Every structure is written in structure tokens, then in C-alpha cells.
Amino acid sequence: MHAALSLNSGSSSIKFALYTIGSDPNEPELLCQGEFEGIPNRIHFTAHDAKSILNDEMIEGKANFKTALSHLLNWIKTTYPHIQLTAAGHRIVHGGNRYTESIQIDEDVLNYLDTLIPLAPLHQPHNLAGIRTLQSLHPTLPQVACFDTSFHHTQPKLATLFSLPQHFWDEGIKRYGFHGLSYRYISETLRKLIGEKSRGKVVVAHLGHGASMCALKDLKSIATTMGLTALDGLPMGTRCGSIDPGVLLYLLSEKRYSNQRLTELLYNQSGLLGLSGISDDMRELLNTNTPQAREAVDYFCYHIQRELGSLVAALGGLDALVFTGGIGENASPIRQKVCEGLKWLNIELDEALNSTASSQKALKISTPESQISVWVIPTNEEIIIAKDVFLLNLSFG
């Protein structure tokens, strides 16, 4: 039986999922999934399938990508001896101007993706390290790059422009948008849930440690909150979101910030962490009764409401609102607070349904009287990666 490996390599973890393929490459079946945490200190490996925990152990040796992926390949071979691993797919945050869909990886692809590291410094280096490590361990295994930016290539030019001289756009300095694998999954799932109504005017709020929103019309991205990099738009766990560029010029010229110090501030010291001075974890902030924690939560919800207004204007109306991502799926107080500020859209939330919604299954949480349907839909980026791997793998031969 053929199988594909979906990988999401981060700075301190590698998330994986193993899928098998039947007669339809558009419907891969999950065999198991798990994570390696603790890089570069000590690696904790967990794996589970739909029924039970398959593994939970600390791994000895150097706590790096090579140790983790080597362990994973051996574990798959031992645990599933009947499985033939035919390809692997990787979540790649930035595909730049060149890649509008998933692609088989070669050195030319990798070299181009290296040039995009400054545009996604928190993610791109680790995404690429996962590819190169797997290449060293399994040189003959085909690998596929699946891009978070690809989904947004349907946006009209006006939505991608900065008001800079035209040659900057020609050089690739434009709004790309991110979380595309998640938005693609939500668009496909929404179509299954509500049929042709999904082709209407939809806003999806992907709310997690990284957060963005996307306007969908006819199931395609027409506008999104992130831009050239994953810093723009909503406030995030440690990222600032939208900020007056004059603030940055002031910090550089008057406060004598170096590029490195400014990067550290914007990516790692701002957002919920910077506002609260307590934590970048929404769960902790919701359970902390201090003025700073409440202000950070209020700021987060306020900017979701403001960005939604912008996206509704781009769509010319709204038919459905979807919450997804770690916060969107699990933080009912955030969904409630956001929707309380959207009564001008005639959104009515069913408080009982909202309080019971979880990351286990899709659920409509608006009342029957609500003019806008509101949903919680758990995202699944890994299955999108697996679909593209299987579809491309068919042409690998």
C-alpha cells in the first residue's frame, strides 16, 4: 500500500501525518499523525491514530531534525511494514512570485525558496531544513513543496498592490497572503457542508499563534489580511500585525534600533505577549484577570472586527463567517466577543452551541434567525499536503 508523509517543520518541532491512498487521490486516508517537540533540547516523540496512542517517548541523541526524521522513518518502517512510502510533502510558508501551486522539489526550487527566507524568517528556514534533512536520509524519496501563498494567487492585482512605485510590484514586493493550506481546506469543507451557498461571500478567520483572515468569493481568495510577510494584519501571539511604518522609521532613526533588534521586536516581542506583558497564549490570557490581559484580548477581538469590516467591503456583503485555527476552534469567549461587535451585520450567535463547539468537528454556531451563518470548522493542512503529494506523485511514475 502506498503512503505519503505530510511534514510541517518549525523551529522547535516537526509535525507529521501519514496518509494512504486508495483509488481516489483526492480522498487520502489518515493512518497516523504525531509530533517531535523539544528541538534543540531533548526530543519528545508522540504518535497516535484515530483509536489510540501509538507512541510516547523521549529520544536520546542530538536533538535536531536529523535525529527526529531518522527516528520517524525507522518507526514507520517498523510499525507499518506493509506500507511503501512513496513521497513526502512539506508545508512551505512562502512561494513568492514563482509558485502558484504545489511542485516537486529539486535544487532549483530549493535555491529559489532560499531567497525568500527574509520574507518569512520565522518559518522558511525551518521548512527548508526539513526538506534538506529528509533528502540526506532518503535521497530517492520524491518530495513536494506545498505553499501557504499559493491559494491567494487568485486575488486581483488591486488587492496585492502597495502604494509604492510600480517597479516594486514588478520585483515581487506585493501582498501575498498566508495560511493558504488552511483556507483551501476550509473552502473545500464548506462546499461539502452548505453546497452552492459556499460560493457566496465568505470570510474565514484563521486565529492561532499566527492569525489572518481571508475573503472568499466563489471559493477563491479575493483579499486577505497578511501581506508581503506574515507580520501584517491581525495582532498575533508574538507578532505585531499592522503598524504605522512611521513607527519603524522612528525606532530606526531616533531609538537607534538595529535591523536585528527591530526584527526581534516585531516577530517575537509584540502581539499578545507584548500587549499583556504576561503570555502569548490566549488560554492563559483568558484565565488571567489583570487589566493588561483583558486589554490584550480586547485588542485582538477589536482588530478582528475591524479587518472583517474591510473584507466585507471587498466582498460587497457577507453570507458566512468561519472560525478556525487553535484560537478560532477552541476559544468560545473570543468567538462570542467578536460576534457581539458584529450585530450591525445581523449576526446572532447561539451561545449554547458556541460554548460546546470544539476542534473535533464542524459546527454551525449561529441561530436560525441570524442573517449570516457562523461556523467553527477545524482545519487540516496536513490532508491538503497529502492530496497534492498523491496527485503529483501519479505523474512521478
Image (cartoon, helix red, strand yellow):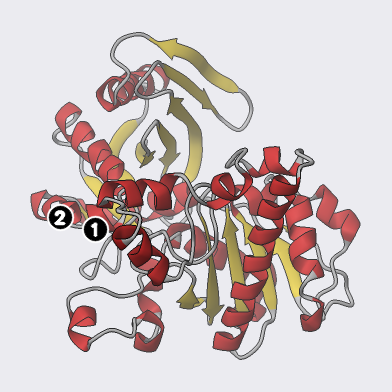
Q: Which mark is residue 103?
A: 1
Amino acid residing under circle 1: Ile
Badge 2 crowding class, 10 Å Cα cut-off, few under 14, some 14 to 19, many 20 or more, is some
- Residue 235's place in the image compared with 244, above or below, is above
Foreground of the two, 331 or 190: 331
Residue pictured at 64% horizontal, 80% vertical: 309
Name the mark on residue 109: 2
Q: Locate residue 132: give its quadrant.
A: top left
Q: Position of residue 287 (x, y in %)?
A: 77, 38
**Drawn side of residue 376 relative to residue 85, left or right:** right
Residue at (53% x, 20% y) in the render: 54
Image coords of residue 185 (percent x, y): 51, 60
Eye-nearest disc, 1 or 2: 2
Q: Is residue 146 above or below residue 280?
A: below
Residue 15 in the image: x percent, y percent? 43, 35
Among all residues in the image, which is located at the extreme left?
108
Q: Are marks 1 and 2 in contact (CB under 8 Å)?
A: yes
Q: Nearer the viewer, residue 96 or 5?
A: 96
The residue lying toward the viewer, choosing from 249 and 221, is 249
Q: Is residue 174 above or below residue 226?
A: below
Q: Residue at x 42, y 65 (%)?
A: 247
Q: Quadrant of residue 367?
A: bottom right
Please, which residue is most extreme toward the bottom here? Answer: 316
Calculate the distance from the C-alpha at mark 1 to the C-alpha at mark 2: 9 Å
Residue reaching furthest top? Answer: 60
- Is there any visible trace of residue 146 in the rendered image? yes
